[in-house]
Image (cartoon, rainbow, N blue to C red):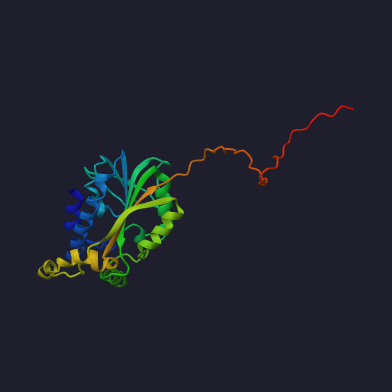
Amino acid sequence: MGWLKIMVSGKKSPHVWYQDGVGLRFFQAEKNELSNILPRLYGYHLVFLGEPLLASLIESSLISHRVLINPHIHSNSADISGLRGSLEALPLRTDSVDVVVLSHTLENSSNPHEVLRESHRVLIPEGHLVITGFNPISMWGAWYASKKLMGSIARQGKMLSPNRIRDWLKLLNFQVVGGQMFYFRPPISHEGINQKLGFMEKWGEHCWPIFGGAYSLLAVKRVIPLTPIRTKWLPEKPIWQPAEGLPKPTTNVRNVKK
């Protein structure tokens, strides 16, 4: 919980959105969403690409070795190791990581496609990629855009729709195997009103699922085998159908004595 304590009590940064009441409430909803995904993913190494103060989102993972990579990281914690590096050129070997988590990473990147490409490179075959982000066509998307406009959030990058990310993943030979929209309540800071709107969570999943405040995506890295497959040659079929009562043609040639 060390990262969460820093998030609550630390100095506000223009690069984060989750330090006030509204953002912190959303943060808890996102943590619950990831707790339904991460415990089902196994392996030896998990890499989190994103803001250091969001690292507690992956606490529910059962993978013991977790690494946070960020170009501005300054320290480590007992729960996760920190590694300074570019997200567009990860300091990791190819095919070395079991799970990569991108929480609001793509929407804060100037080159999100390259971040996905690097995630694909470091993942092992059949490794998992977990992505979360704001839904552009939601009230939370409008809230996030207004925060960027006022300078409360870093203006680098832009929100991406889940359908667009699915297209990029398909080009990189990822297969999307899970994910959904979540948190349908509006960004209201008043705690009492927010509790009364709790019914929107159940209704939203059935009545207006495309307007969820955020989305999650779970994808698997598929690798096409390069081993050539031998063609099974079939016997050639005749090209004609002989009529009834007529002898079938033959390819035998009789030796004719001179």
Q: Is residue 169 above or below residue 99?
A: below
Where is residue 206 shown, x and y percent of the image? Answer: 23, 65
Where is residue 186 shown, x and y percent of the image? Answer: 21, 69
Q: In the image, what residue occupies the spot 70% across and 42% down?
A: 246
Residue closest to the far front: 245
Q: Is residue 227 left or right of residue 112?
A: right
**Residue 183 in sight in this render:** yes
Q: In the image, what residue occupies the spot 21% across and 51% down?
A: 3
Q: Is residue 104 above or below residue 173?
A: below
Q: In the image, what residue occupies the spot 72% across and 40% down?
A: 249
Where is residue 222 shown, x and y percent of the image? Answer: 42, 46
Query: Which residue is nearer to you in this view: 230 or 61?
Result: 230
Query: Which residue is nearer to you in this view: 114 or 216?
Result: 216
What is the quadrant of the C terminus in the image? top right
**Residue 103 in sight in this render:** no
Q: Quadrant of residue 103?
A: bottom left
